[in-house]
Image (cartoon, rainbow, N blue to C red):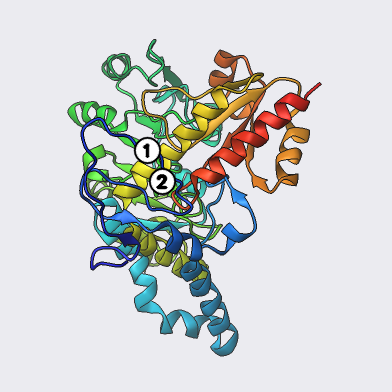
C-alpha cells in the first residue's frame, strides 16, 4: 500500500502488548514498527529489484542491487544518446540532471550548490585533499579505522609534502575512536585537517562523527568525513555532523550505478576559496589571458565531461531512497545484520569481528580451516554474494584482531530474514566441512 509520503510503505499494525514478542518471516510479512511510522513493503521492494531473483545479495557494502527505476533511467538515457547525440541528449535532460543535486541536497540537509558529482568516493576524496595547501609539518589527524585509500593518500601527502600523520587512539571499550583523546590531539597539534571514516569498509564499526565535528567547530579545524558506507544506510545531515567536506559513493547503500560518487563542500570552504589542484573549464572561467576565476559553487570540484546516464541513474537512486525513507532503512538494515551476526557467532570455528555498541550492516568474520579465495568461491557457488577484506585493507584493525583476512557480508533493507538464515546456515555447513 502506498501513501503520500512513501512509495514503499504498508499500514502500521497495532502496538504489541508490553513484553509481547513475535518473530516474523519478512519474506512474507512487513517489518513491524512500534513507533507508529509507515512500514516497508518488502514484497514491492523485492519486485522492484530484479537481482533478488538470481542471488542472495549480501555485498551491498560493495555495490547494492539497482532498483528497476534506476536501471531504466540509465538505459533510457543511453538510448537517447544513441538516437540524437550525446550533447543533445544532455541538453534535453538538463532538468533531470539538475535534480541529481536537488535530490542529494534533500538527502543530506544542504543546498544543491554545495554538491559536486564525482566518478567515485575516492575521486571526490582526492579532489578535496588537492584543495588543501599542505605545507611541511602540517598535521593530518585521523583514526586507526580510516578507509585504506584514505590512509594511502595521507602517506602520499607525507611523502610529497612532508605532512605529519597522527592517528587518534581507539577507546578501550571498543566503541571506535576515543573522542576525548582525539580532541586533546586537536588542541595539541592544531591539525591542518581532521579526517574520519564514518563506517570503515572492513568492519561494522560506526564512528562518532558528530561528536568529533563539535570539537572541530569549537577549534575552527577543517573536517573531512568519508561517508561511503553510511549514505543510504543511515540518515545523514551534514549540518548536524559539522563537517566541511564529505564524500560518498552512489553504488553502495544508495543502490546507484557504478562509477559515481559525490563531494559535499560547506559554505565556509567555498567562501574561503578552496579549489581543486587541477581545475578545468567547468569549475572555472578564463576571464583574461592571465587569469581564471573559480565558479561560486561546488561545481568547481567537477570536470566538464560527465557520464550523464550515470548521473541520471544516481538521481533516480537518491529519489528512490527518499521515497523508501531513511528512517525505516536505518532500523531494518542494521537489524538484519544483527540477526546475521548473532547466528554466525554461534557457529563453531567462526569468529565475528565487528565492534561498537550498534554496528552497521557490515558483518565481518574469520573462519578456521579455510583460505580466503576458496571460501569466497564456495559462497559464490551457492549463490551468495560477499566480499573479502585483507590485512592490507586495515593494517591497524586486523593486526589488533590477529587476522589476515575476513569475509564481509552486508545485507540491505530488501533482503529477508530467510536469506539471513540461509547464509548463516551455509557458513555453518562450510565451517563443518573445513579440514
Image coords of residue 156 (percent x, y): 55, 32
| Front-most of residues 193 and 385 | 385
Residue 100, percent across and down? 37, 65
Residue at position x 72%, y 45% in the image: 382
Q: Residue furthest bottom?
A: 84
Kindly check if marks 2 and 1 are in contact, taking CB atoms under 8 A apart as contact: yes
Q: Is residue 360 left or right of residue 347?
A: left
- Farthest-out residue, left: 218
Q: Is residue 160 at all visible to an observer of this figure?
A: no
194 lies left or right of 398? left
Depth check, front residue: 31 or 234:
31
Mark 1 lies on residue:
225
Task: Give the left or right position of residue 9, taking residue 404 as reference.
Answer: left
Residue that sits furthest to the right in the current view? 435
- Circle 2 residues within 10 Å: few <14, some 14–19, many ≥20: many
Q: Residue at x 54, y 81 (%)?
A: 86
Name which of mark 2 and mark 1 comes first in the sequence. Answer: 1
What is the tally of numbered marks visible in this picture?
A: 2
Give the quadrant of the N terminus.
bottom left
- Residue 64 numbered tag: none
Q: CA distance from mark 2 to mark 1?
A: 6 Å
For the C terminus, the quadrant is top right
Q: Secondary structure at mark 2?
A: strand
The vertical placement of 129 against 249, above or below, is: above
Q: Identify the image quadrant of residue 105.
A: bottom left
> Which residue is found at the position 40% from the left and 39% from the top?
23
Disc 1 is placed on an element classified as strand
Where in the figure is residue 266, as x and y percent of width and height? 26, 47
Instruction: Determine which of the numbered discs, if any, sits on residue 247 in the image.
Output: 2
Amino acid at each position: 500500500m502506498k501513501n503520500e509520503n512513501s512509495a514503499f510503505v504498508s499500514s502500521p499494525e497495532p502496538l504489541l502488548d508490553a513484553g509481547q514478542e513475535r518473530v516474523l518471516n519478512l519474506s512474507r510479512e512487513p517489518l513491524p514498527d512500534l513507533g507508529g511510522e509507515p512500514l516497508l513493503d518488502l514484497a514491492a521492494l523485492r519486485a522492484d529489484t530484479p537481482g533478488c531473483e538470481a542471488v542472495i545479495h549480501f555485498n551491498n557494502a560493495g555495490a547494492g542491487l539497482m532498483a528497476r527505476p534506476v536501471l531504466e533511467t540509465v538505459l533510457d538515457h543511453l538510448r537517447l544518446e544513441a538516437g540524437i547525440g550525446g550533447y543533445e541528449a544532455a541538453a534535453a535532460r538538463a532538468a533531470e540532471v539538475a535534480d541529481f543535486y536537488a535530490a542529494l541536497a534533500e538527502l543530506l540537509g544542504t543546498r544543491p550548490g554545495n554538491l559536486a558529482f564525482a566518478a567515485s568516493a575516492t575521486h571526490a576524496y582526492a579532489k578535496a585533499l588537492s584543495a588543501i595547501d599542505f605545507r611541511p609539518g602540517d598535521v593530518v589527524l585521523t583514526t586507526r579505522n580510516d578507509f585504506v585509500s584514505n590512509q594511502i593518500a595521507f602517506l602520499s601527502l607525507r611523502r610529497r609534502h612532508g605532512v605529519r600523520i597522527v592517528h587518534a587512539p581507539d577507546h578501550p571499550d571498543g566503541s571506535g575512536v576515543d573522542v576525548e583523546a582525539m580532541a586533546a590531539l586537536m588542541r595539541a597539534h592544531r591539525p591542518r585537517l581532521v579526517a574520519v571514516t564514518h563506517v570503515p569498509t572492513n568492519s561494522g564499526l560506526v564512528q562518532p562523527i558528530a561528536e568529533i565535528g563539535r570539537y572541530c567547530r569549537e577549534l575552527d579545524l577543517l573536517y573531512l568525513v568519508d561517508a561511503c558506507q553510511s549514505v543510504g544506510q543511515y540518515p545523514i545531515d551534514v549540518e548536524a555532523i559539522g563537517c566541511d567536506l564529505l564524500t560518498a559513493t552512489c553504488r553502495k547503500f544508495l543502490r546507484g550505478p557504478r562509477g559515481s560518487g559525490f563531494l559535499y563542500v560547506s559554505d565556509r570552504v567555498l567562501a574561503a576559496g578552496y579549489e581543486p589542484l587541477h581545475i578545468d573549464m567547468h569549475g572555472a572561467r578564463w576571464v583574461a589571458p592571465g587569469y581564471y576565476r573559480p565558479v561560486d559553487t561546488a561545481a568547481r570540484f567537477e570536470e566538464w565531461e560527465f557520464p550523464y546516464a550515470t548521473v541520471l541513474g544516481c538521481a533516480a537512486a537518491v529519489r528512490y531512497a527518499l521515497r523508501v525513507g531513511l528512517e525505516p532503512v536505518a532500523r531494518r538494515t542494521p537489524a538484519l545484520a544483527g540477526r546475521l551476526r548473532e547466528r554466525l557467532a554461534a557457529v563453531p570455528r567462526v569468529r565475528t569481528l565487528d565492534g561498537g555498541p550498534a554496528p552497521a550492516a557490515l558483518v565481518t568474520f574469520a573462519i578456521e580451516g579455510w583460505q580466503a579465495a576458496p571460501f569466497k568461491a564456495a559462497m559464490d557457488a551457492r549463490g551468495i554474494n560477499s566480499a573479502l577484506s585483507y590485512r592490507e585493507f586495515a593494517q591497524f584493525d586486523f593486526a589488533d584482531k590477529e587476522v589476515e583476512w575476513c569475509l564481509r557480508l552486508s545485507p540491505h533493507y530488501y533482503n529477508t530474514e530467510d536469506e539471513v538464515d540461509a547464509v548463516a546456515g551455509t557458513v555453518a555447513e562450510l565451517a563443518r566441512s573445513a579440514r
